Amino acid sequence: MIEIKNLHVSIGERKILDGLNLTVKDGEVAAIMGPNGTGKSTLSYVISGREGYDVTEGEVLLDGENILGLEPHERAAKGVFLAFQYPVEIPGVATMTFLKAAVNAQRRSRGEEELQTPDFMKLIREASTKLGINMDMLKRALNVGFSGGEKKRMDILQMSLLQPKFGILDETDSGLDIDALRIVSEGVNALRSPNRGFLVITHYQRLLDYIKPDTVHVMAKGKIQKTGGPELALELEKSGYRDYVGEAA
Amino acid sequence: MTVQAIDKKSEAETAFAGAFEAMKGKGAPALRQASWEFFTRKGLPTRRVEAWHYTDLRASLRTVAPLGAPGAITLPPTTLGRVRLVVADGAFRPDLSDVASLPAGVELSSLADVLAKEDASVLTALGLPENAGADAVIALNAALMQDGVVLRIAPATEVAETIEILLLSSGGEACSSFTRSLVIVGDGAKAKIVETSLALSPSGAQENHVLAFAIGAGAEVEHIADIGPQSESAIRLFSLLITAQAKAAFKSLGFVEGGGLVRRQIFARLAGEEASVSLDGISLLGGKDHADTTLVVEHAAAHCQSRERFRSVLDGQSTGVFQGKVVVRPGAQKTDGSMQSRALLLSENATMNNKPELEIFADDVVCGHGATCGRLDADQLFYLVARGLPKHEAEALLIEGFAGEIVEALGEEAVRDIYFERIRSWLGKRGGAK
């Protein structure tokens, strides 16, 4: 379970999150919707530990433990996973090398034995097959020359290898056509489980046709403005964010 | 190029006269004399010589160490079963070399013997290619050359074994050495030559090495210049001269692992149609290392191809230099040239100087160049740490990827493994980024 309590975040002088509260239970898929520039991506970066954000107040608890003081790799080992809006290309680093390094770094961090190559290969072969990823692709440099859909699929592959407690999907639908969107959503849905929570950040209702949320939260002006069920997303699609942006916008 | 009139000789320039006195009777008197006069006119290069702008040799080389002499040496084991020829502190050492296991079709002489016998064909090849003619360091080498190896590879011979020229510095008392080696590759022959600069123990050695390749028509050469670590006080100058005839191919990797002042200068001349040259380089620098790669590729014939890809990783207070010039002579139509130098700065105090140049005197050519200089990418770094890699491991993976793209181009897996391992071991020594 992740609990975000009274979170205040600034970049330099600029306040981005202004007392945000949000709880996502294990097994729950929570969607955050909101207009551009309301701090949705900031929230995902702050949870996963990116540098450059000043947390001035509040806490982020993962299963009761405040993770804000931890390094990003320690948060990852504890089960935080961020699927990026734009997965980064890393020339010169073979995808397979990276995947093995990531899996084993997390295992080390948790005090577990590292996976030996045959075990790792077995794991990766299974996970890749499920997502329709060709093993040859894993020999190529990470995300270099991959299409938008392939990059997102690669992120989902990582999620299925790393088996996080809490997954954040940051505008996963950006740059995806309908077919790619379906494949990626199926990958996410396959990972839904009673002991794993998801936070799905999106502008559009469309993604939520594929990944059905349990709760929907409207975010504007640095905090959650309204919480409801899936019907709230449909309502937003009709009326827009006007009611939440208010006079200050 | 600017020629600077030097009013007064530096202490080092004066000291070289003593070395010339010792060497001038050791064969090739005319070449030595002419080279010496050329050197004394020009003096040691300073910042005012354009090709040496970022490496002020005159300021760095204050005193001259005595000439090296043969002594007892314990060799490290050979690498990958290479046929090893040892040139230690300036002298070819047949006693330490795999002379008996030279492959068929390869003829070996020591430079000292060739000079003593005044072998005209070799002396002509030893002369400077046109585009290297103005360099004072190569002239100094010709005036003072002590020894080296001369390899002749018979036409149409495919040499399977890799031949390693091991330029050894035994350490202890700093000494200077001037070696010149020559590889004459017959038409249609194939050869793999590795040039390794190794210090058995660190010293302020002053080394001036020339390695020249005369590559016959249709011949193929793979070359590695492996410049290992040395003391911060060492001064090491490596000149690589290449003349490629029609359809000849020369492919090279320079791997520089710091060690005092290192200057690699490469003069490649594509003399016959459809010749090609590919020059790759990796420099891993830290501490106060200074490594300069300055190259000139001259397209003297039509339909030739040249590729240069250099990557520098700079940590500590190190300085990197890349100067590359591609010259396309009139008539060298359909030239295809591309040059790229990229640098990764890991520390606030590291410096990179990048200067790519094109000089094109033909109108139907495709030539391009690019140079970049930057830090580790914050987005890439965050991507990796967000997946669970500790920061120093994420940095190491990115740096390995940056340099490793060049290693990937090597043909033999066992050789690629060596250089990946060298990169990892360098990364292991540096620890986390500052």
Image: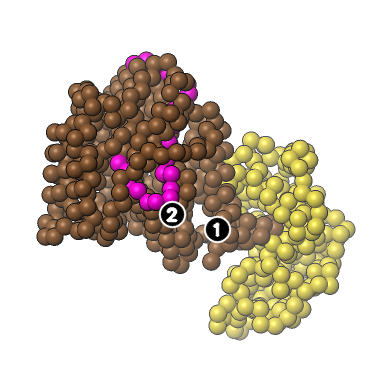
Q: Colour of chain A?
A: yellow
Q: Secondary structure at mark 2?
A: loop
x, y (%) of residue A148? 59, 49
Q: Which residues are magenta?
A: B155-178
The amino acid sitting under disc 1 is Arg
Q: Gap in Å between the C-alphas at discs 1 and 2?
A: 16 Å
Within 10 Å of disc 2 (Cα), the crowding (few <14, some 14-19, many 20+) is some
The amino acid sitting under disc 2 is Ser
Identify whether B261 is placed above or below A23: above
What label sits on residue B231 in the rendered view? Answer: 2
Identify whether B186 is placed above or below A143: above
What label sits on residue B430 in the rendered view? Answer: 1
- Tell me which residue sits at (43%, 23%) in the image: B99
x, y (%) of residue B160? 47, 21
Where residue B184 sits, quadrant-wise, is: top left
- Tell me which residue sits at (56%, 53%) in the image: B427
Camera-side mark, 1 or 2: 2
Q: Colour of chain B?
A: brown
Q: What is the chain letter for disc 1?
A: B
Q: Are marks 1 and 2 on the same chain?
A: yes
From the viewer's side, name the closer residue of A199 and B150.
Answer: B150
Is residue B377 something one can see in this rendering?
Answer: yes
